[in-house]
Structure formats: C-alpha cells, structure tokens
Amino acid sequence: MSVSSTPLTSRGVAQPTESSTPAESPVVTPEEKRSRTRVPPSVRAKERGQKENRPQRGAAIKPKHTPPKLSATGKEARPIPDYVALLMGHVDGAISDRNWEKLGDLLEALSHPETGLDLRQLAKNPAVNRVLDRAAIRVLTAATPVTDEQLSLALDLLNIGCDWNAKDERGNSVLTLLRRHADDDMLAFISTDFPHFRYLFIDPEGQPIKPGC
C-alpha cells in the first residue's frame, strides 16, 4: 500500500506535507474516534480460523487497565498523571515486543467513547508525547514485510493523534509508507473504517494517490 503527506496532526505538529492534498486536518467525530483495530477483510478471513475461540475485537472487550477517574469539576477534570505514564509504557512495550494483539486492546481502551483519553490534549506529558511522535512509524517499521495488521494498527494510532510526518531512517514518512502499501483491499478498508482519511489516499477521480505525490 502507498501513501503521501498533507499536514494532519491535531497536536500542533505539522500535518502531512508530501502531498498536494488539502492541508486541513480531518474532523474526527466521537463515533469515528472509537478504536477500529480490525485488520482488512483479507486478513480477517485468514485469522478467523485461528481465533474462533477468542472474543471478537469488536465485541465487548474489557480494558486491561482501570479507566482514569476524572474529578467532578468538569472543565478541570484531568486523568491521573501516573496512570497516563503507565498506560503509555504499556503501549511502548507492546510495540517493542511486536505484540499486536495487546496493542490493539490498549488502543480500544484508549479510544473508548466513554472511558478513553484524548491524547492530543495530554501532549505536554512527556510519556504521551513520545507515543504521539513515534508510535505509528515504529509499528510500520517493526517487521518486514509489513503485515496488514501493522497497517491497521498504524491507522488506529493516527486516529488517536499520532504523527503522520514521523519518518523512518530512510526519510519515509508514515503517510508515504501507508500509501506505498495501499492495495485495493486496504483502500476499501480505509474508505469503510476511516472515511475521514480517504482523501489522503484516493484522489477526487477515485484513483489511488501515489507516494511522493
């Protein structure tokens, strides 16, 4: 699959810059923000047999960590810093261990519409900032060849605010790497599960946008 860049990050980080696509950040609604750590159709079919006895990711999966408790003061509510740092440590560890199932569960907990965290509002926290800056590129470069699950998880990370412009050691951005691997199945997956990202991968004529465009 393939990808180019247009400014995107809602943390103040420059959105993807390699493309002529609009520099406007896609608006993510609460419904869109919820985790979609599901692999594209081709992979789902492949793994169905292996995971018959395991609960489906879309089903009610209990977060492995207690959701942060917010104070009753509404506007002043803040997650407990220690909890946030611990959770970010688990995300880092799952990526380092290439434990994609654990990472998927963590992302579901993070993006839960009722109990999740808006990491973009917590970017001043060093632990959060490290994840937002490097998590997506780390997932995409963790194993070669890149699997559909890595691509799906990278999209989930971008959906919660990770940096599209983070680059690998060869200077390839997250968006470029995603476009490079964007086959028909992945483009259909993006259109269905991440429609607010579609314009970064498919031009107004319905053609895939090539890397570097």
Image: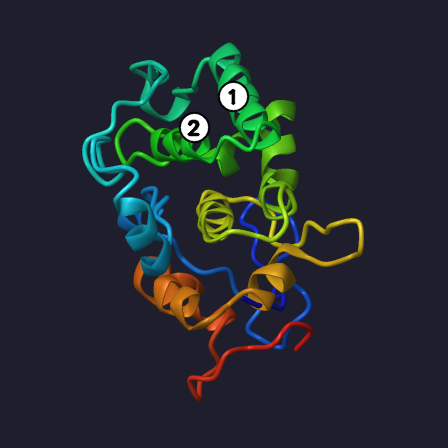
Residue type pointed to by label 2: Lys
Residue ID for mark 1: 90
Q: Position of residue 167 (x, y in %)?
A: 72, 51
| Quadrant of the rendered image containing residue 55 | top left
Residue at 47% over, 51% down: 155
Amino acid beneath label 1: His
Residue 46 appears at what percent x and percent y? 33, 52
The reply to whether dot 2 and dot 1 touch (C-beta < 8 Å) is: yes
Residue lying farthest front? Answer: 49
Report whether 142 appears left or right of 160.
right
| Outermost residue, bottom side | 205
Q: Which residue is mark 2?
A: 102
Q: Position of residue 51 (x, y in %)?
A: 27, 37
Residue drawn at x 55%, y 77% as measured from the top left: 209
- The image shows residue 32, relative to residue 179, as above or below, that is above
Secondary structure at numbered mark 2: helix
Within-10-Å neighbours for mark 2: few <14, some 14–19, many 20+: some
Nearer the observer, 75 or 53: 53
Within-10-Å neighbours for mark 1: few <14, some 14–19, many 20+: some
Q: CA distance from mark 2 to mark 1?
A: 9 Å
Q: Nearer the viewer, mark 2 or mark 1?
A: 2
In the image, residue 32 sits, relative to residue 109, either above or below, namely below
Tell me how many marks there are: 2
Task: Relative to 117, say whether 46 is above or below.
Answer: below
Label whose residue precedes the other's in the sequence (2 or 1): 1
